[in-house]
Structures are given as C-alpha cells and as structure tokens.
Image (cartoon, coloured by chain):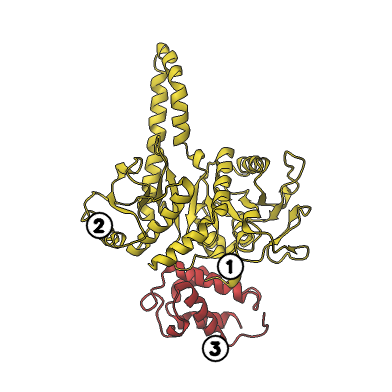
Chain colours: A red, B yellow
Amino acid sequence: MEQGPIGRDEIFEIVRDRLADILEIEPSTISEGQSFVDDLDADSLALIELVDGLEEELSERTIGFRIDDEDLEDLKTVRDAVDYVHDRAK
Amino acid sequence: MLPPAASAPAAAMPRFRTRCARHVAGTKTASSSTLAEPKLTAKMLPVAVDVMGGDDAPGPILAGAHEAAAAGVPIVLVGPSDLAGQETTDGGELPLIEASEVIGMHDDPAQGVRRKKDSTLVRAAEAVRDGQASAMISAGNTGATMAAALLRMGRIKGVKRPAIATPIPVPGSTPTVLLDAGANAEVQPEWLVQFGLMGAVYARHRFAIEKPRVGLLSIGEEPGKGDTLRKEAYELLAASPNLNFIGNVEGRDVMSTNVDVCVTDGFTGNVVLKTLEGAMKTVITALMEAFAAEDHYKPHAEALMPSLLPLYESLSPDTYGGATLLGVDGVCIIAHGSSSPTAIVNGIGVARAMVDQEMVAEIRDAIDAAAV
C-alpha cells in the first residue's frame, strides 16, 4: 500500500470508486456535487458500507483513521465526504 | 463495495492452516505459518462457530460445536484465547480463531461491527471472506450478525439487500420459507422480487422442492389487496419469468401446504415469526396443562405421546437450526439466541449443506439472470 499524505484528488477517486462499487453504477457518473440521497439514491446502509470500506482502506495508510458515527448525518454530498476524509487523513 | 479480497470467498485462494496448527491466531494478517494449498476448496474448509454469541454462550454453543465435530464436520471456533486447546472426542483439538471482543445482544449492530473489529462476529465473517472458513454460524445479536456478514463478506453482485430466510414448520410437509424475517424493516417493491428469487433457490436446496411456489404475504388473495408496496410488488413478481409466483397469500397460509416461499418485508416477517413462535408455545403449554388436568387423563396422554412427540419435534425451532442470511457472498447462519446444542449442531449441518450445494453461486446466477 502506498504511504504518505493522501491528496484530495486521490481521496475523491477512492470515495467515488467505493461508492460506485456499492451502488453498482459507473464511477464516471459520480461527481462531487451530487447528493447521496437525492441524486445517488444511497440510503443509510449504503453510507455505512461506504464509511466502513473507507476506514478499512485508509486506516492502512493513515494510522487511526476513523469516521465517527455522529458525523455521518453531516455527510450529505460526495463533496462533504471527500472534504471530511481529506481533513481527517492529513 | 468491499475490496476485492472481500468478494467471492469460494474462489479466493484458500489460506488454511495445517492440521497441526490448532491455534489460528488472527486472520488475514497472520500469514507467517499459513500455507497456500490451491487444491483446497470451500467445501473442505471448516465452519466458523461464534462461540460467544447467544443468551447462554459459550456453554451450549461449544457443546454443539463439539457434537458436530464428533460427527465429522470440520469446525473452527471463534472466541477468546482461553478457549484454545478444546479437546475433541477423538483426542484432537478444535482449532481456534482468536477474538478478544464480543458484540452484545443489545449493542447497536452497525456500530458494534465497526468499532469491535476484534469481536467474534467480525472475525468469523472475516474467516469466511479470507478463505479460512467455508461458512459462519452465530446465535448472537441478529442485526450485528447481518452487519458483520454484509460488511465483511459483502453482497452478491446485484443483490439490493440481504434477507433473512426462516423455515416455518408445516406439519406433515416441507416447511414454508419466510423471508424477510427481520433484516429490512422497510423495503422497496423490487427487493421483494429478489427475496422471492433467493428464497426459491434456498427452498430448492434446503428442502428439495423442485419448483417452489412463491407467494406474496398480504391481507387478501386478490391482486388488488394490500398497501401500495404490496400492489407494486405483486405486479413485479407476476411479471418475473424466473419465478413460480402463485399470487398473494395470507397469514393463515404460512403454516399450510399452500405456499413454499412466503415473501414479505422484514418488519412484517419478524412480527409473523414471533407471533407463530409465541402461539405455538402457548398451544403446547395449554395442551400439556390439559393432559395433566385430571389423573385419569394420564394413560390417554401417554398413549398419544408417540404421535405427539414427532409433531412437537417438527415444530421446534431447534430442528431447523436457525435462519440463513441470503444475498451475502458467503454462507451465514443466524441461530436463535436461546439455541440448544442440538440447534447449533443442526445449524452447522445446514451451513455445511449450503456450502456443499454451492447455494451462494446459484443465488448469484439467479439474480444475474433476472437482472432485477
């Protein structure tokens, strides 16, 4: 696994690819401005799958990386998730 | 979805300890003495038993695991380190995957799985994912079992939501498969079609029903009966060429020979399941009290026992060994919290049969073919 700081573009790619896998849609159809619920039809279970997958992948590169459950409801859009992860994975 | 290693456990490279390595410490990171044996298939791998799941764990769970092992089923225990060295009846030892945490019956399922990464449930699901076990069984927190299986094994591609399939006993006949029995309180119409497809595969494998009759649980037999969900699901089910859909069924049909697979949402399914369990318990208790009401009833009651005991056994949840979580990429048995050793033995037997019959692969094919 690649080590070192993770750039925002790379985080977007990780989030996008995970999300595409969970929702079974093409990654290219996902953009930062999209809402999880309104645009991507992602429900709470899909978001749990997303954050669990992100924690598993990113904790190997950023020691102690975790997404707090109480923060989940603040993640409304793909951009929210990318910003959140970028902030935590520094 | 989960990373590549999380999918297709049957096809993953088996990473299996040698038989002399009784203590399987850790899972995917403990590879120092792991041997890659390409000839091993999922069918040859042990069933992972969550030793700490259940109201009275680990007592009855361990007893059931030992009994299954004595009957020749390969078992790997998942539990705390002090369980290492469990001797089998033939003088051997049951292997152990070490797990230091337990997700309690009242813990939040998703949080429990995400925070207790060294819990017995998470380690059991990872064992299936990583090719250390062929299947898992737990009598612990139902929601957490589902979450662990979902998050660690992953969903079968195309499956919108896993569902809990529970056999409902039918006197003198094969059981009715009820699903969803509690995994999804709220569902969408197309999910019910997938439940029907998965339930039909399960009924074929589990009860050798060649062409299972699939019914939609509603409040009347006519197509227009029920709420919006039921009406929309009816249309989709009726239009599914791969299903033997017989239309709406009612609550009274669940324990009858009228239907083989009864499809519903998880909220309704769980209410039905618990209602039937409670009703059967009440009836049996009342029957026993009636037999004991007068002394001169006793010989008559005893005369009836040879006929009543097999009936009682056929109605007992222990007989069926628990429910099966369908739609995840591996075999996961959810046993009753109060499971006896017999229930665990039977649950392990079901797990083994589902692996041997490659049920997961057939569900994958059914979902893929239907493209719902």
- Badge 3 crowding class, 10 Å Cα cut-off, few under 14, some 14 to 19, many 20 or more, is few
Residue at left offset 66%, top offset 43%: B72
Q: Quadrant of residue B6?
A: bottom right
Q: Amino acid at mark 2?
A: Asp
Give the image location of residue B141, x and y in percent: 52, 52
- Front residue of B367/B168: it is B367
The dot on residue A9 is: 3
| Visible residue check, residue B27 | yes
Q: CA distance from mark 1 to mark 2?
A: 38 Å
Q: Is residue B54 above or below residue B100?
A: above
Residue picked out by circle 1: B6
Name the secondary structure under disc 1: helix
Residue at left offset 55%, top offset 49%: B353
The dot on residue B135 is: none
Residue at left offset 57%, top offset 38%: B342
Q: Earlier in the sequence, mark 1 or mark 2?
A: 1
